[in-house]
Image (spheres, rainbow, N blue to C red):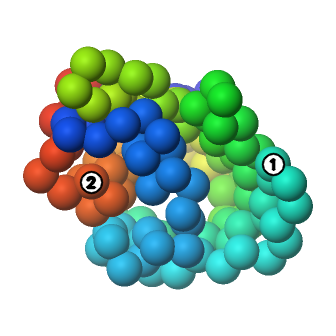
């Protein structure tokens, strides 16, 4: 299954500030042009169901996911429950670093069209990578340094 990994250093913010910003999904559309809409469908202690619309090449990608928050570990784990592709799951993780923190994003995806996977997977991987970088840059502005993509 194809995967995407991105790491970014965030300067001038604490781990807690970085994590809090990442958890505020409803602000993503105003802070990042890659995200069109996020709706929180259900929120309980430590978990949430959210519905997303993001730019995907010349179109829109839509899905719903279950999100699990662990502030002590600095993680947000997500699992798509329905949507335009067959599989999308992964994790955001924030770790402290002197003068800031590191945001790591790891995800697995499956477009669900095996006969075209050799064509679609690289396109989808690049689009996902670009969207995540755009989201991180939108959330943290000039304090971002992409260190692994």
Question: Sequence order check: which comes first, mark 1 or mark 2?
Answer: 1
In the rendered image, the quadrant that contains the C terminus is top left
Residue 128 image point, x, y percent: 41, 49
Distance between mark 1 and mark 2 Cα atoms: 23 Å
Residue 111 image point, x, y percent: 61, 49
Residue marked by disc 1:
46
Residue marked by disc 2:
140
How many marks do you count on the picture?
Answer: 2
Q: Residues within 10 Å of mark 1 (few under 14, many from 20)?
A: few
Above or below: residue 26 compared with residue 18: below
Left or right: residue 79 versus residue 113 is right
| Residue 88 seen in the current view | yes
The residue at the point 65 percent across, 37 percent down is 71
The secondary element bearing badge 1 is classed as loop
* Badge number at residue 14: none
Left or right: residue 119 versus residue 73 is left
The secondary element bearing badge 2 is classed as helix
Residue 72 image point, x, y percent: 66, 29
């Amino acid at each position: 299954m194809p995967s995407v990994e991105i790491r970014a250093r965030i300067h001038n913010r604490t781990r807690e500030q970085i994590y809090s910003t990442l958890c505020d999904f409803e602000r993503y559309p105003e802070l990042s042009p890659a995200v069109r809409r996020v709706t929180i469908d259900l929120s309980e202690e430590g978990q949430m169901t959210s519905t997303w619309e993001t730019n995907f090449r010349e179109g829109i990608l839509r899905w719903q996911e279950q999100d699990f928050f662990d502030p002590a570990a600095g993680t947000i784990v997500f699992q798509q429950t329905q949507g335009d592709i067959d599989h999308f799951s992964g994790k955001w993780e924030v770790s402290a670093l002197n003068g800031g923190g590191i945001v790591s994003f790891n995800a697995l995806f499956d477009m669900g069209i095996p006969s075209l996977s050799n064509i679609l997977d690289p396109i989808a991987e690049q689009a996902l990578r670009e969207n995540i970088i755009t989201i991180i840059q939108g959330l943290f502005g000039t304090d971002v340094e992409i260190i692994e993509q």
